[in-house]
Each structure stands twice: as C-alpha cells, then as structure tokens.
Image (cartoon, helix red, strand yellow):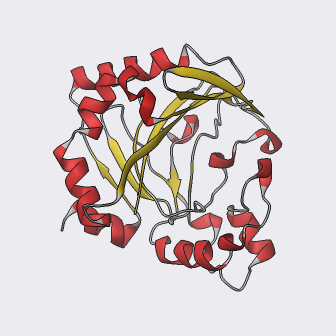
C-alpha cells in the first residue's frame, strides 16, 4: 500500500528514519536560526525575509509562520523535504499534480506548561478549517511528556464532513479563528460528531522521522506535561 493510500485510510502516516543523522542536524539548524528572530512568548510571520510579530501572544513559547518568499532562509528544509521525491510523489497521488504545494510552514517551540486558557489553537484536539496535507518533523523528537502529536485514528471522513457542513459557516472560535476544536463540535454541531477525545493516541516520533497528516483527522500537539520539557514542531502545508 502506498503512503498516500495509508494516509487516506488512517488519516496519518509516519516515515521512520526519513532524515539521515546529518540532514536531521541541518534542518534543526535551519529552524533554530529562524526562531532566533522571534521574541519569547510571541507569534511571528516571516515574508520576503522580514520578520514581523503579531498581536496574538504565544505563552507556550514561540511560534513562527514562514512564507514561501522566505524559504531561501531554510535551504536544508527545502532540500530535504520540499525537494524530496517521496514527499512530492505522495502529494501528487493524494491531490494531483496541480495542487498548491508547500504554501506555508508553521513552526512552534513549546517550552513550558501552561493553563488550558493559554494553550494555542493547535494544542486542542481539532480538525483544520481547510483541507490540507501536512508534512511534519520534530527536531528534538516528540514524546507524550513533551507534547507529541495526538490523532484520533480513522477520523478523517468525519472531520471532512464537519469542515464542510459546520466550519464553512465560519462560526467564531478561540483567538478570533473559526471554531475548529472537538469541544466546539460537541457544543455547536453534536449531530455531526461521533468520535471522542478519549480515542486520541500519542504519535511519538524521533528527530529523524517525518509525520504525514491529513488535517481532516482530529489532531493536536504541543501540550507540555512535565517541567524541563520542550518541543519543536515544523508543519509544511499543501492543499488541493
């Protein structure tokens, strides 16, 4: 079974040891260099190699959105992931050759335990408000204690229905975004949701692994459970 078909069936797939030891160090360097430009506790965006900070805070640590006009700043990520034949073949099989590839990169660096009120949108179990195939890597590795990604397996089809029939109405959610969390669905469209948060599993990965995720699948990540833990997650987005 192909990687694309596995993602279609299960909602996610992990390519173990996708990176060599050397390339894992190089992509880590790229993203650490970008985080050097971001103030602690802030959300930032880099476009045309200019970093600007946004009004929304990020109490968990730092968060950055890298636009394609700044991809020249992350040459090792481009070389190892965006130019990977496996990655591109998977996108082509999943969405076809004319899809929107590598639209943006979101990277978060969670460093501390925070209250639920201070959790970012990504740390609640949710489905995204748009269809997307994401490729993610974790330069420090990811375990349950430092916020490994969580998924509800085989929830992709339900998430797609909720995205199309509920989120498309653009109801208001946390931090001014679309209501996209499972707790929002329980409250606002209970007739559409059958899965529960208790079904979520931790997807633990090493710094050399690559996670592939269809974002209609219920997922979350970055909730630090123990002191002195930290996690970096880098998610590369493609859309139909």
* Image height of 172 relative to 108, above or below: below
230 or 225, nearer to the observer: 230
Q: Which image quadrant is residue 23 in?
A: top left
In the figure, is residue 4 to the left or right of 36? left
Which percent across, then down, holds residue 173? Answer: 78, 58
Q: Which image quadrant is residue 110 in?
A: top right
The N terminus sits in image quarter:
bottom left
Q: Residue at x 46, y 59 (%)?
A: 132
* Image height of 184 relative to 51, above or below: below
Q: Which image quadrant is residue 239 in?
A: bottom left
In the figure, is residue 31 to the left or right of 224? left
Can the viewer see residue 142 in this picture? Answer: no
Can the viewer see residue 157 in this picture? Answer: yes
Q: Residue at x 64, y 80 (%)?
A: 165
25 or 180, nearer to the observer: 180
Which percent across, then down, holds residue 70? Answer: 44, 27
* Image height of 13 relative to 188, above or below: above
Number of marks in the rendered image: 0
Looking at this view, name the residue that lies furthest to the bottom.
Answer: 191
Which percent across, then down, holds residue 124? Answer: 67, 52
108 or 132, nearer to the observer: 132
Q: Residue at x 53, y 30 (%)?
A: 231
Q: Residue at x 51, y 66 (%)?
A: 216
In the figure, is residue 60 to the left or right of 139? right
Which percent across, then down, holds residue 168? Answer: 65, 72
The C terminus sits in image quarter:
bottom left
């Amino acid at each position: 079974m192909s990687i694309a078909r596995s993602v279609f069936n299960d909602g996610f797939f992990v390519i173990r040891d996708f990176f060599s030891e050397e390339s894992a160090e190089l992509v880590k360097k790229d993203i650490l260099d970008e985080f050097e430009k971001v103030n602690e506790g802030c959300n930032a965006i880099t476009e045309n190699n200019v970093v600007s900070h946004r009004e929304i805070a990020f109490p968990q640590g730092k968060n950055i959105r890298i636009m394609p006009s700044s991809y020249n700043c992350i040459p090792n990520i481009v070389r190892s992931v965006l130019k990977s034949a496996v990655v591109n073949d998977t996108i082509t099989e999943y969405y076809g050759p004319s899809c929107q590839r590598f639209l943006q990169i979101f990277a978060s660096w969670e460093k501390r335990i925070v209250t639920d009120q201070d959790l970012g949108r990504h740390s609640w179990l949710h489905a995204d408000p748009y269809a997307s195939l994401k490729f993610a890597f974790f330069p420090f590795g990811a375990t349950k204690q430092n916020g490994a990604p969580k998924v509800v397996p085989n929830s992709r089809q339900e998430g797609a229905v909720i995205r199309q029939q509920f989120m498309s109405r653009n109801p208001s959610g946390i931090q001014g975004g679309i209501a996209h969390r499972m707790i929002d669905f329980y409250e606002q469209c209970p007739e559409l949701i059958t899965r529960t948060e208790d079904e979520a599993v931790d997807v633990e990965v090493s710094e050399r692994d690559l996670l592939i995720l269809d974002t209609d699948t219920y997922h979350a990540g970055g909730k630090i459970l123990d002191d002195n833990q930290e996690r970096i997650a880098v998610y590369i987005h493609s859309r139909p």
